[in-house]
Image (tube, helix red, strand yellow):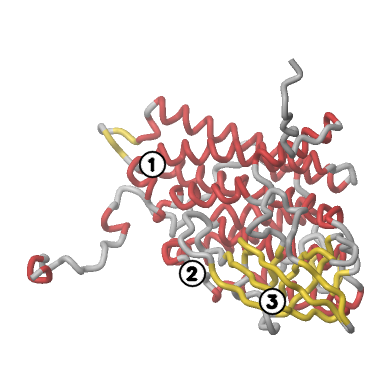
Amino acid sequence: MHKEAKSSYFDMPALDVSVAFPQATPASNFPPCTSDYYQLADLLTPEEQAIRMKVREYMEKEIAPIMTKYWEKAEFPFEIIPKFGALHIAGGTIKGYGCPGHSITGSAVAAAEVARVDASCSTFLLVHSSLAMLTIGLCGSEMQKEKYLPSLAEFDTIACWGLTEPDYGSDASGLGTTAKKVEGGWILEGQKRWIGNSTFADILVIFARNTSTNQINGFIVKKDAPGLQCTKIENKIGLRIVQNGDILLKNVFVPDEDRLPGVNSFQDTNKVLAVSRVMVAWQPIGITMGVYDMCHRYLKERKQFGAPLAAFQINQQKLVQMLSNIQAMILVGWRLCKLHESDKLTHGHASLGKSWITLRARETVALGRELLGGNGILADFHVAKAFCDLEPIYTFEGTYDINTLVTGREITGLASFKPAPVRQKSRL
């Protein structure tokens, strides 16, 4: 009866967006870059400029046409992995072992160019490269570097990085996952959550608490190890292409040769996080550049009341506010890279950069969503997708609030992460 009530065209496929809305170009044909108003290229070396343009061309031509489809389905486009390998950007700043040995500025602008077109792809890259590979590069043995880094650099194998747990998010140093020493290796027991790439990673960098020393140690776990289980987290509204997973470790044996010798406390993970926060700060820079580029083209194409939307004062004001934010964000990100290159970068520097840039990015993409009106909620026009994708980036690698407290501790010398103890009685 209900089937009979449907119209004859009820189950027809949706119109292609270029037919349904011919007045503006969808993001599958990505707009040219108009957001670098203060000309960052002048601050880059020729090598860094070449990296930037190589990645930009690849993302616009190869990735932009397919990303909306995969984002909608929350599936990962595995066919792009060999093409990413050909870019030779994985491993970033690591020298040798098949890694490119770029400057951190070169790696940062590459990450931004990936994020400009698709934030999920940049997250996939940064988890693999700036977390997992960098941990092996900074904390691994010579044997581990030679064994794992070359194939990771080519994307022949994929890695993930397991720190966060269901009970320990911002309080990451708490860690309930344990590592017990046994003959010839270690037994891992515990659970991880929100681990990007984990459902298809070949190796998993896992952090666990040593039951003998009570300190945090790092381990390389192979996929399909007995007792290891990874399942996809469903129903996300942001970074939908990223395959975040729940990891269960039940009596998982890791041989001694796969314990990371440079991770002996939580402070050792901070060596990686300080660098990765600089890289993550460039994600929202890239995202907002893509949003601005899309809005800039859209406002010139879309007409209402007999004029392009770009001709209206209030739209120009919003566009200029977005552009202003982006220029400031780029310069802060560039300064973070220079501090790192001169060995002056502190945890407070990195945290302030990540928190402030993501805050400004939130404002910027919200303005972009307004400017596109109804099309601002369609992934076809990029801005809605970027709007959703920015939310998890605002949260991961330290929430805005936690990162401000890291900087606050550094500038005052006083930690304020835990609430003041509750007094039983008032002193009055």
Quadrant where the N terminus lies? bottom left
Pointer 1 or 3: first along the chain: 3
Q: Amino acid at mark 3?
A: Lys
Residue closest to the eye, 424 or 103:
424
Q: Amino acid at mark 1?
A: Leu
Q: CA distance from mark 2 to mark 1?
A: 26 Å
* Residue picked out by circle 2: 75
Specify the quadrant of the image occupied by residue 96. bottom right
Going 69% across and 74% down the picture, which residue do you hit?
249
Q: Amino acid at mark 2?
A: Glu
Which mark, by number, is residue 413?
Answer: none
Q: Could you tell whether 427 is left or right of 300 in the image? A: right
Pointer 2 or 1: first along the chain: 2
Going 48% across and 64% down the picture, which residue do you hit?
234
* Residue picked out by circle 3: 250
Specify the quadrant of the image occupied by residue 422. top right
Above or below — where is 175 with respect to 149? Answer: above
Q: Position of residue 17 (x, y in %)?
A: 32, 57
* Residue picked out by circle 1: 372
- Helix, strand or loop at disc 2? loop
- Helix, strand or loop at disc 3? strand
Q: Could you tell whether 287 is left or right of 367 in the image? A: right
